[in-house]
Amino acid sequence: MINFLIVDKIIKDALIEDIPQEDISTNSVISEDSISTVDLICKEEGITAGLEVFERVFHILGKVEVEFLKKDGDKIYPGDKVALLKGNTRHLLQGERVALNLLQRMSGIATLTNKYVKEIEHTSTKLLDTRKTTPNLKILEKYAVKVGGGHNHRFNLSDGVMLKDNHIAAAGGITNAVKLCRENSSFVRKIEVETESLEMVVEALEAKADIIMLDNMNLNTAKQAVEMIGDKAIIEFSGNVRLENIKSIAEIGVDFISVGALTHSVKNLDLSMKNLKNI
């Protein structure tokens, strides 16, 4: 479920950015009372995500009705009609680019996420996103990951304890970093520790970390780490994960694999508003 108290601000900021004063082109040729219909068309195979966000753009602008022929999570193909829009022509044209930009990005993330999920669905490993998101669009991008079949890692720095390399260096090592977290953070928080070698894995185990991340390890080293950890901690693999190697990583028995590319290197799914007709 999307929190529209947050999303409305994202949309309004985007509309102000795109229409700081007025839409000169539209207002020059379209009367205020003009009513039209237009189709939302799919031009590329993928997974839909963000249809409610798309619709919300037009509701914020004014009088536009949106009839959806698909829902979030549906597989769509070139030529598919995803929605039919009817309403004030100016509002349709003014909201078109912002609505499409958000929908295309969210659908692109869902599509890419689903490709990764398909590679590991024969295992018990779950796919995670990361905090490598577009500033101010995190809530939308992480929602899209879930639509694509993935799971969310931390939403923000207040959401959980993760001791990365710089935290560990600043604390003087894993042992002291974990000790300080236990003393200074709530007991309800799990503590995750990033490790880059088997020696660090041993130290994380001895410190009783709840989650051990295997960061940028080669497959052989990661496999040894999984055997060492066993059921003593939750295991996450991260770093240099691609569609070509995620299956092999999952098969060594990690609980989670986090992939930054789901949100930081995604290609927007191609959708378009076409066939506008005055009525």
Image: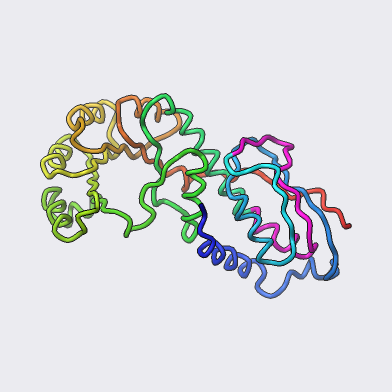
Q: Residue 191 location in percent, x, y?
A: 22, 49
Q: From the viewer's perspective, is 10 left or right of 259? A: right
The residue furthest right is: 279
Asked which colour scheme the image uses, the reply is rainbow
Check residue 217 for magenta coloring.
Answer: no
Task: Give the total number of marks visible in the rendering.
Answer: 0
Position of the C terminus, as image quadrant, is bottom right
Q: Does the magenta stretch include residue 92?
A: yes
For the record, the magenta segment spans: 74-100
> In the orientation shown, which residue stands out farthest toward the bottom?
21
Residue 189 rendering spot, x and y as whole percentages = 24, 53
Between 196 and 110, the residue placed more toward the observer is 110
Indicate left or right for 151 with 235 as reference.
right
Q: Which residue is drawn at 51% across and 35% down?
A: 114
Looking at the picture, how far across and down is residue 11, in whole percent?
Answer: 59, 63
Position of residue 158 measured from the top left corner of the image (x, y, whole percent)? 32, 60
**Image quadrant of residue 204?**
top left
In the depicted view, which residue is nearer to us: 177 or 86? 86
Q: In this view, does 186 lie above or below 236?
A: below
User: Residue drawn at (50%, 63%), measured in percent from left and top?
Assistant: 6
At 66% across and 56% down in the image, what residue appears? Answer: 55
Q: Is residue 233 left or right of residue 152?
A: left
* Image quarter of residue 246: top left
- Asked whether, in this view, residue 245 is left or right of residue 206, the answer is right
